[in-house]
Image (spheres, rainbow, N blue to C red):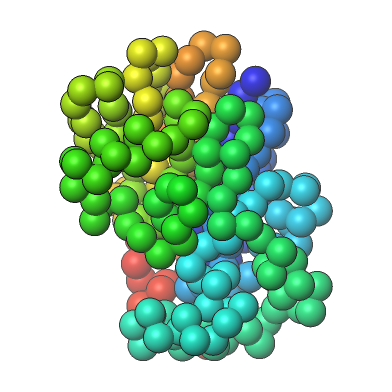
Amino acid sequence: MKIGVMSDIHANYEALRKVLADADALRLHEMVCLGDCIGYGPEPEAVLSEVRRRRIPTIIGNHEMAVCDRIHLQWFNPSARASLEKTLTLLSEDSLAFIKTLPYSRTLFGAHFVHGYPPDSSQTYLFQKTPAELRKTFESLTVPICFIGHTHTLEMIQFDGRQVERRPLSQGITPLLDSCRYMINVGSVGQPRDGSNPAKYVIWDQERARIEVRFVPYDIAATAAKIKAAGFPETHARRLW
């Protein structure tokens, strides 16, 4: 199977529709979303409607948690809180109900999927973990690969049973070794923070034992204009570039 894994769409429907078009053209068997479909961006309802329409298995992110329970808003900086307050006014009852059904993690297709850090954290960042902590987590996982989002940056962590090796991921194909376990950070569809601005997602090719990082161009100017027109903080538009 070829499985697409995406994360951190952040209400950027222009980016999402281009990623899904790319995935459709490649005839992927499945797509999985690692959460943060909302927040920062101008079209949360359109994004959630598309995810729901396609029945894409989805994990809850920290931005979804904040609209489920406002106590979580305290985790965010003032502009992010303002964005989430605005987001709440744009979501339908159906979308809010859908968000409340999202799990903290899923194990599907022989892999584990979580927004922040395994087994089931939506708030913990991968970069916060020491090599010793990473090793302990690898040893506790029951599957050889875990897909993660949250940081908006691409990264691979490999564990060969002895050593933990971290390295950034770039566009293109990276082989996976049967003798190793992996954590793969799939970057962000709607707001990459790795120095390049295309939408990012990852394809896991199970048969060929490899992953492919896809860079997908989209109309950034259109999303930036929508952010400003909708009354979201302008900083969320600027950092798309």
Name the spot of residue 67 as percent of width and height, x first: 59, 79
Please tell me which residue is depicted at 63% across the width and 29% down the height of the picture. Answer: 109
Q: In what quadrant of the picture does the C terminus appear? A: bottom left
Q: Is residue 45 left or right of residue 131?
A: right
Name the spot of residue 7 as percent of width and height, x first: 51, 51
Q: Is residue 137 above or below residue 224?
A: above
Q: Is residue 173 left or right of residue 29?
A: left
Please tell me which residue is depicted at 28% across the width and 27% down the height of the picture. Answer: 159
Please tell me which residue is depicted at 29% across the width and 39% down the height of the picture. Answer: 136
Name the spot of residue 69 as percent of width and height, x first: 57, 82
Whether residue 141 is visible: yes
Whether residue 79 is visible: no
Residue 50, quarter of the rendered image: bottom right
Q: Is residue 225 left or right of residue 234?
A: right
How many numbered callouts? 0
Name the spot of residue 113 as percent of width and height, x first: 53, 43
Q: In what quadrant of the picture does the N terminus appear? A: top right
Residue 170, quarter of the rendered image: top left
